[in-house]
Image: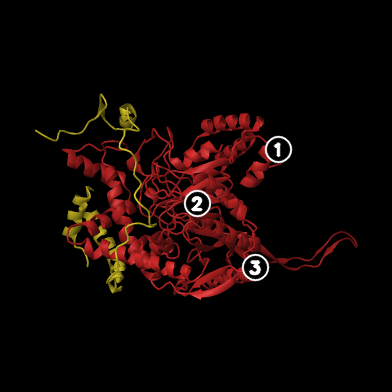
Amino acid sequence: MSVDLQTVKRVAHLARIAVSEEDAERMTGELNAILGFVEQLNEVDVSGVEPMTSVTPMDMKKRSDVVTDGGKAADIVANAPATEENFFLVPKVVE
Amino acid sequence: MSDLTQLTISQARAKLRDKEITATEITEAYLGAIERANPALNAYVAVTGDKARDMAKASDARLVKGEGGALEGIPLGIKDLFGTEGVHTQACSHVLDGFKPRYESTVTSNLWADGAVMLGKLNMDEFAMGSSNETSYYGPVINPWRRSRLDTAVMPTTHQGDGGFVSAGGTRTVRSLDNAQLVPGGSSGGSATAVSAFLCAGATATDTGGSIRQPAAFTGTVGIKPTYGRCSRWGIVAFASSLDQAGPIARDVRDAAILLKSMASVDPKDTTSVDRPVPDYEAVIGKPIKGMKVGIPREYRVDGMPEEIEALWQKGIAWLKDAGAEIVDISLPHTKYALPAYYIVAPAEASSNLARYDGVRYGLRVPGKDIVDMYEKTRAAGFGREVKRRIMIGTYVLSAGYYDAYYLQAQKVRNLIKRDFETVFAAGVDVILTPATPSAAFGIADEDMAADPVKMYLNDIFTVTVNMAGLPGIAVPAGLDAKGLPLGLQLIGRPFDEETLFQTAAVIEQAAGTFQPEKWW
């Protein structure tokens, strides 16, 4: 499978990365080189093979549903580019 | 002791305990070395001198009372991927501009609890995506190793005085260093360079497809990627969560064993951290390997592999045989599919993990006309080329209609890769010996690799299988090539059998010796 310029622009928008026309053209070539490389996986017979979901067989760790952490609002917003009273500030989303 | 930076961790540990040296002295020695070398090598992106001095002072107080921990007073460098409280943590990306976490990663917490001293944060490929340390926002790291040339110098016949000394002339061989700058490998290039150039006693690193083992091989250092689940991933910037694993880079096998013992733990904060006690890895060093079954996989003999790598591999086989190991030929039939499967699984997980960098909660923000525009501009300005490329691949293979064809297929192939290993281990193989990399270190700004991303990806051809299967792997220096550059061998073990890797790597080290670059910086 290969991608065209339109697909690259659509994927860039899905990934929320602004691309210039020039970027998109360059990326089309690069992505096709990588997709061409991974194409060889199709020759592997995987009938009856389960997809791998964990590296080591182990049960999901569970713990009691209790609060073990918290009260750190100031720490959580400390690195944000814009905040007000422990809220993250973003451009207006709803009119 | 003239230069404290020359001490291995085990040597420094003994001298600190015996009060022959202090933590403050060795820390100052490293800080001085970093100040002199970093402009040339670019291994550190942040040096935490004040913090290092405070930690060393506290170590000295504990050492005086005889209360020193396992790494008391040992100065370490930390890869920029590890969250370090109040200290530069950016995965060497512009998108995390100014980020200083309010928490400490589990691995580094373990090291500080054992008394280690932090010298600073080490350069790396952006978000650990790269095999040359050239994708860092902070610029490439330079390998302390340089190619050298053997020249034949003609010596003139000289006479000194009447009937005095006479030099008969003739020829003599001179080794001269080439000026070309080489990459240290990646993504843990800063860690490998800092260890190899004596800018820290040991370093933390991480390995998703070969990011510990390939730079270790390129710099003549020892690097181990433990079994998935051995070191907690909590507080480490995530790249591909089902593949990422932390481990040390060190100057010799014993130092790597000492560091891994401290880094590894069972951590309730990481659900994939495995509930098994951490063994004393150092205890197996020096134990004989007589009777051990060593597998040699035929699929690792790839087309176009330099003869020197094949010769090195044969040398490794001979050393292990001499030490009493039984050598068996094995087959891992799905080896060639590991790298293509990796380039689906890793970008898919990365595209999901890196979705969090949106200019809202941390790091860079580039204003836009609305919120989507802000996201798109922030991510366009914050991520470098390689990171964007991988996010794009990941987004594409996970997008509607392609999930089965790419991601599901790759995860099935991954299971087959894992089964290949399980089959040979079930047949009694204890450890597998392979080359660590298909070549020695290459030049900065290699044109072939810049033109074709897949060429760069091929660096990980021998290491990536290990991540796909979740197994432990160690790279150990085994010799120099004709140009005087280090080459490494890799040992692959059963899940959670790091002890066999250290035990066998120590035999290779014993035979091959250790390697130091000639100082030019």
For the N terminus of chain B, the quadrant is top right
Mark pair 1, 2: CA separation = 36 Å
Give the quadrant of residue B151: bottom right
Q: Is residue B299 above or below residue A11?
A: below
Residue name at image x 29 percent, y 65 percent: A50
* Mark 1 vs 2, N-terminal side: 1
Left or right of B14 on screen, residue B214: left
Could you say which disc has been placed on residue B18 in the image? Answer: 1
Hey, what amino acid is under mark 2?
Answer: Ile
Q: Residue furthest right?
A: B163
In-front residue for pair B514/B323: B323
Q: Which is in the foreground here, disc 1 or disc 2? A: 1
The residue that label 2 is drawn on is B142
Residue A19: percent from the left, percent from the top?
A: 22, 50
In this view, the residue in front, B4 or B353, is B353
Tell me which amino acid carries mark 1. Asp
Q: Amino acid at mark 3?
A: Ala
- Alpha-carbon distance for marks 3 and 2? 36 Å
Tell me the yellow chain: A
Chain B shown in which color? red
Do dots 3 and 2 share one subunit?
yes
The residue that label 3 is drawn on is B323
In the rendered structure, are the residues bearing label 1 and label 2 in contact, judged by CB atoms less than 8 Å apart?
no
Element on which disc 1 rests: loop
Q: Which mark is residue B394?
A: none
Residue reaching furthest front? A64
Q: Where residue B109 appears, x then y in whole percent?
A: 47, 38
